[in-house]
Amino acid sequence: MSPRTLVAALLAAALAILGLVLPSSSAPAVAAPVQTLEWTAGASTDHYLSAPSTAVAGETTILFKNTEALGSTMSHTLTFDTSTEGYNHDVNLNILANPYDEQNGEHQATVTLTPGKYRYYCTIQGHSKMVGELVVTDGGGADTTPPTVTANVTGTKDTAGNYVGSATVNLSASDSQSGVDKVEYQLDSGAWTAYTAPVVVSAAGSHMVHYRASDKAGNVSPEGMSSFSVVTGQPGDTTPPTVTAEVTGNKDASGNYLDTATVKLTATDAGSGVDKVEYKVDEGAWTAYTAPVAVSAPGMHMVSYRASDKAGNVSPEGMAHFTIVSSDTTAPTVTSEVTGTKDAAGNYVGKATVTLTATDAGSGVGKVEYNLDGGPWLTYSAPLALTVVGAHTVNYKATDKAGNVSAEGTATFTIVEGDDSTAPVVSVVVSGDLDGSWSYIEDATINLTATDTGSGVDKIEYKLDGGAWTVYTVPVKVTALGTHTLTYRASDKAGNVSAEQGGAFTIVAAPPGPDACPDSDVRDTVILGTADSQVENRDTGNGCTINDVIDDESDYSSNDQFVTYVRAVTQELLDREIISSDERNLIVTAAIDSGIGGSTAEPEPQKRPETKSPGMKKVVKTPIRDV
């Protein structure tokens, strides 16, 4: 046996004792899995804990987890919208998950996604804020096309085309692949700012707005520009606008509005013109009015409103009072579901979980109540996990917001003692690329599996480097350099927990690549022609300096063409965090000052050293390695 074979055999034996298994070079090839997307939900009713934002078209495995380990005690659904305009409607997905159901809140489905956007949400009453979007690309390769962004300036103009009082800049962007990530603008010489709403410019004078957009693949559009001038408004306008409200809807004999009242606001101003109209419902925040406001919550309401003109005058606040009552006379529907592990006689072994679900198409569910074995009526807020041995009866009912009460429902079942006393068997495989020292290069992936021949596996847990216990759901990828410790265990549905097992593994950095520029320009600062930017001429990561990657010795038809080229190169350096935004501006300024481009005689550029001199400073970024 060769020394290397002997070392490998000894290492494999040692890892087997620790519970770790090295990947085998002779293992059969496994087909690549289909794309897997995971959503998680917990104790919140206004957002999913995690959700993907992008995917590629094709067959996809959907994982939806709503478990006790995630903090959940209630039902949630993952439902794809098949009716709202503007989204794909070709996937019918409606998963109901409860931490106490037979899958313990972990469900999966296989669907086929097509390019476009999908809207997903939770259908449970009161969970309407749990909503999001999934952007699906065609999977034909990486998105390298930047978004398209346009600007539209609006406002009241004088005969010379100047905007009177103020101008409003509206930006819009689109991207047909990965989708728009952000839109930014720069007003005059100000900083780049995230665009979230139309920008109102009221300072008198000439203005220039630069704008750009980035998509979710990191592509950035070329900068756009729009110039305009603002002049002061008509002097002497001190009269505020006039604003009125009209409330419409179906009324009952007492003058109350049935289900919904709609408030329409109208404002006029004979001076500088109406600038904006605002409203608030009850004690809510002031909101810009753009369309009639529909109010549907039962009860008394007050809508306050006001208007401002372009000279800054604000009208007195107006108020509209009205009351909304429900026309709903239909009681809610409420159902029960009992889940758990059953024996041959249909009894639940060890535990039974009762889940109540109520729906109401009218005013909406107000509350759900239950009583257990003849006890008092209690408000239902989460599934009931019962472990007391014996026969049980759960009565339940629901009330909607209009006061209608459903008929009482009943669920009967029996719980018997369990006889599973054997803990699950759990094992681990750590996989990845290995170097000659059996260390993993760049990353390692932890795969845990467990089996149980009794009540079945309930959960697998692990902790890494002495951290907290974490429920294992998918393979865990570790990228931090250094030596790591892993501890793991499994529990079955009867509550038996396996003995803790563990081991250690090491991750090291990949060896450095070859120097792409053996004859680098290693001047201390970035110099274009004779213009010194004063920016450090640092290494870009592969042996090439900034001076190496900016070609200032080719022929350019004009200085503008050279400056445009430098803008593009420095944008990439900025995106890679090699230079800062201020350093980029200094390099672009040096490109302008260099005079490079066109037929105009250019100054003699400083001669680059032909080889690396020991007296010249070359800065190279070296990764920090943990020990």
Image (cartoon, helix red, strand yellow):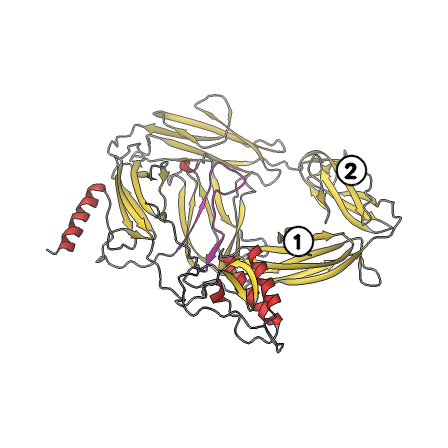
Return the x and y of residue 101 as percentages of the image width and height.
40, 38
> Is residue 541 visible to the viewer in this orientation of the structure?
yes
Nearer the observer: mark 1 or 2; the answer is 1
The quadrant of the image that shows the N terminus is bottom left
Give the label on residue 523, or none. none
**Residue count near mark 2 (Cα–Cα under 10 Å), binned few <14, some 14–19, many ≥20:** some
Q: In this view, does 539 lie to the left or right of 414?
A: right
Q: Does the magenta stretch include residue 589?
A: no
Q: What stretch is highlighted in magenta?
A: 33-56
> Of 583 and 214, which appears nearest the observer?
583
Return the x and y of residue 599 as percentages of the image width and height.
62, 78
Residue at the spot 40% in from the left edge and 30% down from the top edge: 385
Residue that sits furthest to the top in the current view: 375
**How far apart are the two marked residues, 1 and 2, measured between alpha carbons?**
42 Å
**Which residue type does callout 1 highlight?**
Gly
Which residue position holds label 2?
320
Which residue position holds label 1?
190
Q: Is residue 41 magenta?
A: yes
Residue at the spot 63% in from the left edge and 51% down from the top edge: 196
